[in-house]
Image: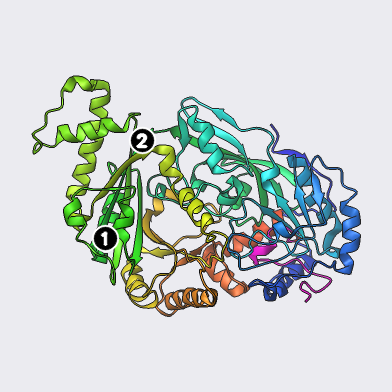
Amino acid sequence: MSAITRSLPSTYSFKPNHIVPLWFYLMLHLSYIPYEAEECSNHHDVSSSLIPSHLDSVSSLKTLSLDGYLIFDDTHYASKDFGNTVNLLPLAVLHPKSVRDIATMINHIYRLGATSDLTVAARGHGHSLRGQALAYQGIVVFMESLTTPKMQIQPGEDPYVDVSGGELWINILHETLKHGLAPKSWTDYLYLTVGGTLSNAGISGQAFRHGPQIHNVYRLEVVTGKGEIVICTKKQNANLFYAVLGGLGQFGIITRARISLETAPSMVRWIRVLYTNFSLFTKDQESLISSHKSFDYIEGFVIINRAGLLNGWRASFNAKDPVQASKFRSEGKTLFCLEMAKYYHPTETEIINQVALLLNPKLSIIIPEYQLTSEILTPVKLVLQETEAQLAGMNYIPSTVFTSDVPYLEFLNRVHNSEVQLQEKGLWNVPHPWLNLLVPKSRIDDFAKEVFGGILTTSVNGPILIYPVNQSKWDNKTSLVTPDEDVFYLIGILSSVTGSGDLEKLVKLNSKVVELCEAKAIAMKQYLPHYSTTDKWRAHFGSKWERFVENKLLYDPLSILAPGQKIFQKPRTSKGCRK
């Protein structure tokens, strides 16, 4: 297959070995002007009246030959995202039925040149946080409409799945499990699209072993900012391949991806333990991620003054020592929870419990060996022995071991269960002023002391994640930036607004955390970053900034794509926000 499977005619072209026209540089510098649409955030609804220059745009868009369709009349459903703090009305929403639809749309806008204000944003499941997938008075591409070609699973020695960029990870899980396979690396929440997570990174508790999702991709199909459909791999069009992975949608829309698979387990032994000592907590985490015979999933949480914590856990977890655990209280304390999972293959939950009895010499009950075949007994014994050996060398509070054995699907889809409960209470579609950071190991103690012991002294109405990953599992060729250390921590302050005035309060807390890192010279990097000035974006990308700008000129020279990221701004002929 050729590198360019389809290249639509274009008015402008850019080749890296040619002299770049002066107007390109002028345009690029103009793009550093902060967005005027910023004043439209925080729940201010933008007027649906058309900017005069867009009347011609609507007429020209209606002439396009598409397999799918455009919606102009009611586009409010594409004006917000999961963060629910920004509301920017697009001019139109494209529901593509083919990759050609997306390429045709982008190329049409590219042909209009700098005379058009139109921009394009790809929207997956709408889980961006600060309007990153919005396009004020532009075109939002509803990626979940892109369902063809169908998902294709290839078993064998190096199994993989070919999927649309608009496919949800939960659907991939269901389909691959039918073949006894599954992707290696996940996100905690599975109702996200492939293109969305690959444009950022895709991180969960498997990242210490397999790296993020962008480290587990073989092949991509991308529509660039010129409307070109390009196939790319690590060897074919490699520059674009690495640029779009973690590239925040700046260089192209991922329309198809080939994802690496592995043999799927059927069951998970899910374990949680608690700590009061942060140093012991991080020591155990770092030891586990450096071990080849460790768990398959490792995450951590910070629990600040949470009442009824252990009682809530007992609904789905079994206390190893229920008498002592019932005496443990969490109110008024800052605790640290280490969450681990070990995968195994038996299909019946009872099997592992029976083996646990067999391995415990203190039990007087003798379970006949004939109930278990050696084929089942040996691997399950091994799982339990490895788990017990790991736990024996750790420093958690002895009375706070909670375990549960659940199907693999249930474990991976655990956050969705919480979503359903929150939706029933009307607490899911609320503002989510989340802050995600990557903090170097060398400064994690300083960060914890100041943030968990000072700034965040009360609950933030949401989980606080903290867990380490290995730099060696992250490919530095991608656009993603990480701290320059062998081990760094993901910190996720996942706040939810539950009352009036909470949004402003939580946003201020986030700002204090970021300002603290700057004041203390903690060289963190934002994950799912949000900045509004060129200087801050340049500082964020560091040594990768020049290459990032070069790739923008190469693949999206008119800054058509992903305007909501606020990295580059297309020169506008009219004001962007009207009230």
Which residue is labeled 2 in the image? 267
**Residue 13 place in picture, x, y as percent:** 79, 53
Report the predominant secondary structure element of the magenta stretch.
loop
| Other-residue count near label 2 (Cα within 10 Å), few / some / many at <14 / 14–19 / ≥20 | many
Q: In the rendering, which numbered label is found on residue 72?
A: none
Kindly identify the residue that appears in the image at 44 percent across and 43 percent down: 412
**Residue 122 place in picture, x, y as percent:** 68, 53
Q: Is mark 1 in CB contact (under 8 Å) with mark 2? A: no
Q: Nearer the viewer, residue 180 or 271?
A: 271
- Quadrant location of the C terminus in the rendered image: bottom right
- Quadrant location of the N terminus in the rendered image: top right
Distance between mark 1 and mark 2 Cα atoms: 26 Å
* Amino acid type assigned to the residue bearing label 1 in the image: Phe
**Residue 25 place in picture, x, y as percent:** 74, 68
Badge nearest the viewer, 1 or 2: 2
Q: Secondary structure at mark 2?
A: strand
Which residue is labeled 1 in the image? 281
